[in-house]
Image (cartoon, coloured by chain):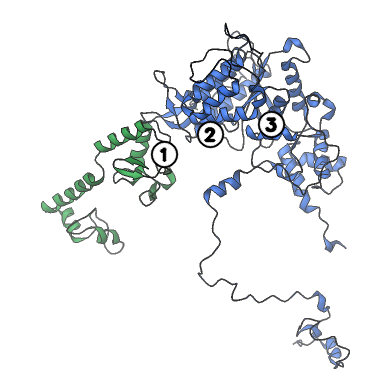
Amino acid sequence: MASAWCWSCLSRLRPTTRAVLPPPSAIPRLTSAPFHSSAVQYAPPLKKKSNSMTQLKYRQGQTLRRKKKKTRKALRKRIILSNPNALEVEGMQEISAENIVDARLRGSVLGLPVPMLDQLRAVQAFKPKQGWSIFRRPGAVVRRDTVEMGRLFEKISGEGDAAEKGKVVKKVVTGTKGSGKTVHLLQAMSMGFLKKWVVVTIPEARELVSGDTAYVPVEGSKPTQYIQPGATSALLMRTVEANREVLSGLKVSQKHDIAGVKPTSTLEDLAKLGFQDPALAWPVFKALWTELTVTAAAPGMEKDFQTRPPMLVAVDGLAHWMHNSAYRDTDYKLIHAHDLVFVKHFLSLLRNGQAELKNGGMLLYATSTSNSPGVYALEVALDQMTARQAGTKPTSPEYPSAEAYSNADPRVLDLFKPIEGKEPQMELQTLGGLTRDETRGYLEYFARSGLLREPVNENWVGEKWSMSGGGIIGELEKLGRHVRSAAIPTPAAN
Amino acid sequence: MVFILGVNFPERNLLKASNTSALTSQHDPRKSLESFFGIGNHTSSRLLARFNIHPTCRVGELANKQVLDMTAVLSDMKIENDLRREVVNDIKRLKETGTYRGRRHALGLPVRGQRTRTQIKTPVKLNRMERRM
């Protein structure tokens, strides 16, 4: 049997004179150290004995308490737009009314101007789980779809081609998870603010159907329709907060049956009546909508009339509006989302947008993949729309239709059907991945913010582009963040 | 504070228990409607639907008319002491007619054919000569 002693170490056991040894307090007391060849300094530090005063006894009450529900929610929902630890990107441009159509900026990240952040916050354009908090300042990458949208904004505002002025563009925005649908809406909103449009948003379509706000039946409607005063009042509040500058410059031009409206009051005053009294919210919203979509003043009120700006309507999470809501009618039957007046109003814009938005504008209704109820009828309807856009006739056998016995909701299918004898206005926009060049620009932004410490070259970008499923921006962001921790040099390498 | 059927509820209380916590509603003081004996998830959700009140409504958000309507409907229903009395009377009738079920009630044993070797804590606790609800 081998001895437990290391014989070569025994030679060192010769007693050393005290004067040669360092004072005993200078080296940690390790009883086994002389028998091993490794130096004392590599030994793991001695574990500190835990103090009996600080250690918790068995089943002793913990002082750590879960935070209150309200605080927890606030933490969950908070939006951080800046990270002071990230590097400031030099030469970063801001989005402006001029450069939204600039195709040369494709692939670069444009910052959002600071005064606009309040407006964007007011319309709830930022969502808590987006990665705004990793960069110095909020910005969004310019991609092909962004430039195209910029051109549309120019056209509708009547700057480039006068013939297109006052047109209504209606789009249903879809795309795979992380393809940037919500940020696309955000970019649209920022362009709307830059062009002095009126921006109306519904940041969470779900909130209208989840049964969390009050609902009141409309007397005498058949089938019964329901008003949601609380949600309407919130919408008015958002709209006024974000569009104060535009709304305060426009005067009332029609006669309204609402107490408190004077001929001299501005549209801001009108909207404010609605959020002071939720009972008035819906009539006020209707009045505001009429005001924003009129082309001429009522007789006798022409004095202060100004032409109304185009409107941007952005809805996120469209699928929630395509099935039964959580509300119930008096017979305890579920109410279909299309029977809620608020929802119906915005969905009817998809059908007859030109009739409603007389001053032109854009409707962007985005689906969501992170929060979607999965409505079969909507999937079929979107497939049909894709097929129509590809040129398939509804009579051809390739045209997709709902499976037999699938019980697809006819109301949803009807909503997306083309109107007979009319040019199809509603189009489907599917957001895909970034191109390689755009990917490169986007990842360079990570590198210049100090998040990514790897040389961004053609090969590396190509690899990341493939890994992100062909430039899906959400995946790219994950990769950009992930590399941050992997790229720190390890001491063991030498 | 809002009076519903003579009971005073704080305004921040939920009118109805959410589905997940319906089981504990009797012990949870925040669920107002289901704190009445005889009103559970089934009845309370139908009551809300009848008056077009959304499921997460708080007591303070109710309009005066809704409170009055609700009280009117509740006062027509057999809940609270009326319901308790009915249940106690039913058991009493079983005992008086000398049925097996009545006897089991009186003996503090399970009534519906359960085994008695183990697990009869509840009947031991509840079933007795003078049954209380």
Which one is nearer the viewer's eye here, A33 or A240? A240
Helix, strand or loop at label 1? It is: helix
Return the residue found at the far top: A299
Is B19 located above or below residue A420 in the figure? below
Residue A434, x across and y down, in percent? 77, 33
Q: Nearer the viewer, residue B93 or B62?
A: B62
Distance in Å between CA atoms under marks 3 and 2: 19 Å
What element does badge 2 sit on? helix
Q: Quote the CA–CA distance across marks 1 and 3.
A: 36 Å
Drawn colour of chain B? green
User: With respect to residue A279, does A29 lie above or below?
Assistant: below
What's the residue at 56%, 31% (across, down)? A205
**In the image, what residue occupies the spot 63% across and 75% down?**
A50
Query: Can marks 1 and 2 be said to lie on one chain?
Result: no
Q: Nearer the viewer, residue A443 or A214?
A: A214
CA–CA distance between discs 1 and 2? 21 Å
As drawn, the label of residue A146 is none
Residue to which mark 3 is pinned: A186
Residue A445 percent location from the top left of the image: 81, 40
Residue at point 61%, 19% (across, down): A399
Query: Is residue B17 visible to us here?
Result: yes
Residue at image mark 1: B60
Mark identifier at residue A207: 2
Categorize mark 3 by other alpha carbons within 10 Å: few (<14), some (14-19), many (20+): some
